[in-house]
Each structure stands twice: as structure tokens, then as C-alpha cells.
Image (cartoon, grey):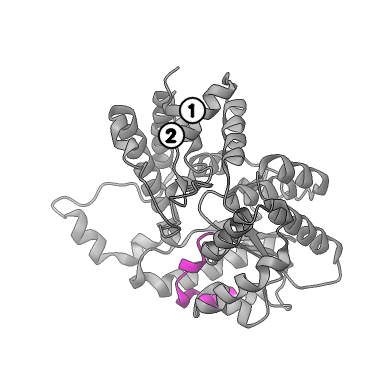
């Protein structure tokens, strides 16, 4: 099964190399380093394609390493004692290959379906352990779709630890509001580390970002823009973004910010409820909204802070850390989605391969459901 994953990514890489306008031979005798240094403007013209290719190359090498040397992957299983590790991981982009390749070949784009019944069903069935996020997302999207006369975009700010379902919730929203979900031309995901990695290119990024937003908005009555790792968005890019959030923007957009800001606060409050013997389902938005706002205010100059300062965030959406029962449901979903047989024993075996924290309680999965699929793929039949 791991071999099949490697083969799939190899084919995807070849397709991207064929389609990318940047894949060409350098002039004879000229080094790659000197060419990159001397032709920044030419590089930027195809930056998204090349960055997608670079990411897939990284993912391919990682999976190949896991296939050839399984012990290398096991090194990720470390004994972490607190909440203080980085939240960004390339696993959030696991579906990027499918999105890019399909967008090259699928002519059916731009259709808005706004299936609220399907949205509620999918959120409740697929986003595990997140009663607050499910409730807030449904309420916010319904209000947005019912406010036909309003010109204001809907701004949702997702906060939570890695692997708790923020990206999954985005996919569920896209799948139920747009034909083909995130492959729809009315949706766009921006990832700072992927799309805006070089400080020296900020002016070019500003132009390109404004151009992309304008193009999508001009062809879509209801575009959706997602800013993953929004707390890592370079401050220089705020200028072309702010018009998106204003009342006088030409289209009513859905804007979703994803960040790890406030995740430590969310985790501590959830753990305090656990210590008090109170079920996580009794945690309310009132318990978390003000602490989340305080955490955002502490991170000044960043995009979430700027939007909070100007009163442009409509809803804060907290994602709680996941317990063993939720991770087990994630494992069950992976088995079922790939038509793989499983038992309670095999589900428990997946849990044994994951890290749970804090050190003394071992209550929450250190990486949520992020590494569940990888662990299942590496399990021997």
C-alpha cells in the first residue's frame, strides 16, 4: 500500500512537470544557483506551479524514505511533555496533488451548490470531537447565505492545535458549497510558506495576490478564500488583502483564517474541564471566545490581530484537542474510506503508535488525527 502511494505521487510529479511552464533546461554552462539569483522576476511568473512541484517532491521523498527505512518514520514518535511544538506540517497539504492535477483536466468549474443539509451532515459525521466548531460553522454559514442584501464578506477565524480538524472542516465547507469543492475555480487556498516563502519577493507577491483575488472575484458571485497558517502571513501582504474584508468589496466572499494562535489556551481550558470531571461537551463558546480574543491581541501586527482590531472577524471558531476516542474514529474513517478491513484491535494498535500528552495525563493526541493515515499505511497486514 505504501508502494502504491509512492507510485501515485511519482505519476503526479511527472504530470506537474509536463504541465508546469517553469520546467525547462537552463542555458549551457550556467549554474542553477546563478540563474535563480539573476532572474527573480522570471522565477516569480510561475511561482505557484513550481512551489506545488517542490512540495510534492518533498512529500515523495518523505514517503519513499518511510517505505525504504521504516525506522526513520518512527523517530517522529517522541515523548512530548507540553503544548509547545510547532503547528505547521506538510501533512496538511496531502491532497494538493489531486487538487492540482484535477484542476488541469476538469473543465467543470465555478458552480455554487450551497448544500446546507449536506454541510451539517458532513460536519457532524466527519469532524470528530468538535461540537463547538460544528455549531459555529453551521450558524455562521447559514447567516451568510440568508443575508442576501448585505455586501459584507463572512470572516471566520479557525483556532486550534495541529491535527484537530481545521483543514478537514475547510474541505467539508468547500465540498458542500461548491461543485468539486476546493477544485472549484471560486475557491482558493493560500499558504504563506508555500505561496509567499521569500522576503525579497514581497512586492511581486502583493501584485500577484491582488491579481488572483480580483480574477476570482470577477468570475464568482460567492468566492471562498482560505488563509492557512494565517499567523505566518507576511505583514506586507495585508494591504492587498484588507479590501476583501470591507463592506464595499465587489463580491460577498467567505474568508477563512486558520492558525494555531490561542491553541495553548484552548488546550489548557479543555484540560481543566477534564481535571474537574466535566465532559468536554459542556464547554461553550463563551468559555473560549474572550480567551481567544486575548490571545489574538497578544500577537500584534499579524493578520488575525489586524482584522480583530478593525472589527472584521465575524466568528471565532475553536477546535479542541482530540482525545483517544476521537482519534479512534479518525482511524475508523481511514480504514472505511480505503475499504480496508479493521477490528477494535487494529484501531487500538493505531492508537499505540501515536503520542498523547500532557506527560502525566496522556489525555490528548499530540498531533490530533494528522498521522493516523500514515500509521495505518505502514501497518503490516
Other residues around mark 1 within 10 Å, as few (<14) / some (14–19) / many (≥20)? some
Q: Residue at x 60, y 62 (%)?
A: 269
Q: Position of residue 380 (x, y in %)?
A: 42, 20
Reading the image, the residue beneath label 2 is 353
Quadrant in which the N terminus appears? top left
Q: Residue at x 86, y 71 (%)?
A: 149
Query: Does 268 appear in magenta?
Result: no
Element under label 1?
A: helix
Q: Which mark is residue 238?
A: none
Is residue 258 among the parts visible in the rendering? no
Left or right of residue 248: residue 62: left
Q: Nearer the viewer, residue 42 or 180?
A: 180
Reading the image, the residue beneath label 1 is 349
Secondary structure predominantly adopted by residues drawn in magenta: helix
Farthest residue, direction left: 29
Q: Nearer the viewer, residue 361 or 161?
A: 361
Other residues around mark 2 within 10 Å, as few (<14) / some (14–19) / many (≥20)? some
| Residue 331 higher or lower than 215, as above or below | above
Q: Residue at x 53, y 56 (%)?
A: 161
Q: Position of residue 129 (x, y in %)?
A: 65, 46
Quadrant in which the C terminus appears? top left
Is residue 265 among the parts visible in the rendering? yes
Query: Does 231 appear in magenta?
Result: yes
Range of magenta residues: 228-241
| Residue 266 higher or lower than 348, as above or below | below
**Total marks placed:** 2
- Marks 2 and 1: CB-CB under 8 Å? yes
Left or right of residue 245: residue 268: left
Element under label 2?
A: loop
Q: Position of residue 158 (x, y in %)?
A: 61, 61
Amino acid at each position: 500500500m505504501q508502494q502504491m502511494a509512492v507510485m501515485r505521487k511519482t505519476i503526479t510529479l511527472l504530470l506537474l512537470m509536463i504541465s508546469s511552464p517553469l520546467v525547462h533546461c537552463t542555458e549551457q554552462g550556467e549554474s542553477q544557483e546563478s540563474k535563480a539569483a539573476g532572474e527573480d522576476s522570471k522565477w516569480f511568473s510561475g511561482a505557484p506551479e513550481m512551489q506545488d512541484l517542490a512540495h510534492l517532491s518533498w512529500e515523495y521523498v518523505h514517503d519513499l524514505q518511510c517505505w525504504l527505512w521504516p525506522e526513520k518514520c518512527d523517530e517522529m514518535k517522541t515523548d512530548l511533555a507540553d503544548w509547545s511544538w510547532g503547528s505547521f506540517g506538510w501533512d496538511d497539504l496531502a491532497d494538493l496533488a489531486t487538487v492540482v492535477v484535477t484542476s488541469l483536466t476538469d473543465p467543470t468549474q465555478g458552480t455554487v451548490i450551497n448544500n446546507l443539509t449536506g454541510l451539517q451532515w458532513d460536519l457532524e459525521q466527519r469532524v470528530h470531537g468538535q461540537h463547538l466548531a460544528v455549531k459555529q460553522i453551521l450558524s455562521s454559514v447559514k447567516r451568510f447565505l440568508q443575508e442576501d442584501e448585505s455586501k459584507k464578506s463572512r470572516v471566520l477565524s479557525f483556532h486550534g492545535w495541529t491535527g484537530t480538524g481545521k483543514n478537514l472542516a475547510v474541505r467539508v465547507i468547500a465540498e458542500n458549497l461548491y461543485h468539486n469543492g476546493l477544485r472549484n475555480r471560486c475557491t482558493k487556498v493560500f499558504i504563506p510558506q508555500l505561496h509567499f516563502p521569500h522576503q525579497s519577493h514581497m512586492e511581486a507577491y502583493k501584485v500577484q495576490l491582488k491579481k488572483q483575488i480580483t480574477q476570482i472575484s470577477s468570475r464568482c458571485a460567492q468566492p471562498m478564500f482560505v488563509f492557512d497558517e494565517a499567523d505566518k502571513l507576511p505583514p506586507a501582504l495585508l494591504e492587498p488583502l484588507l479590501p476583501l474584508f470591507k463592506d464595499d468589496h465587489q463580491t460577498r466572499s467567505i474568508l477563512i483564517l486558520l492558525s494555531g494562535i490561542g491553541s495553548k489556551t484552548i488546550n489548557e481550558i479543555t484540560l481543566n474541564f477534564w481535571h474537574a470531571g466535566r465532559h468536554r461537551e459542556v464547554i461553550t463558546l463563551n468559555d473560549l471566545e474572550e480567551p481567544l480574543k486575548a490571545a489574538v491581541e497578544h500577537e500584534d501586527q499579524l493578520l488575525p490581530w489586524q482584522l480583530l482590531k478593525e472589527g472584521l472577524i465575524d466568528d471565532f471558531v475553536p477546535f479542541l484537542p482530540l482525545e483517544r476516542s476521537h482519534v479512534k474514529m479518525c482511524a475508523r474513517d481511514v480504514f472505511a474510506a480505503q475499504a480496508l478491513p479493521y477490528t477494535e484491535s487494529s484501531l487500538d494498535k493505531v492508537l499505540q503508535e501515536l503520542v498523547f500528552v500532557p506527560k502525566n495525563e496522556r489525555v490528548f493526541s499530540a498531533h490530533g488525527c494528522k498521522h493516523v493515515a500514515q500509521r495505518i499505511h505502514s501497518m503490516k497486514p
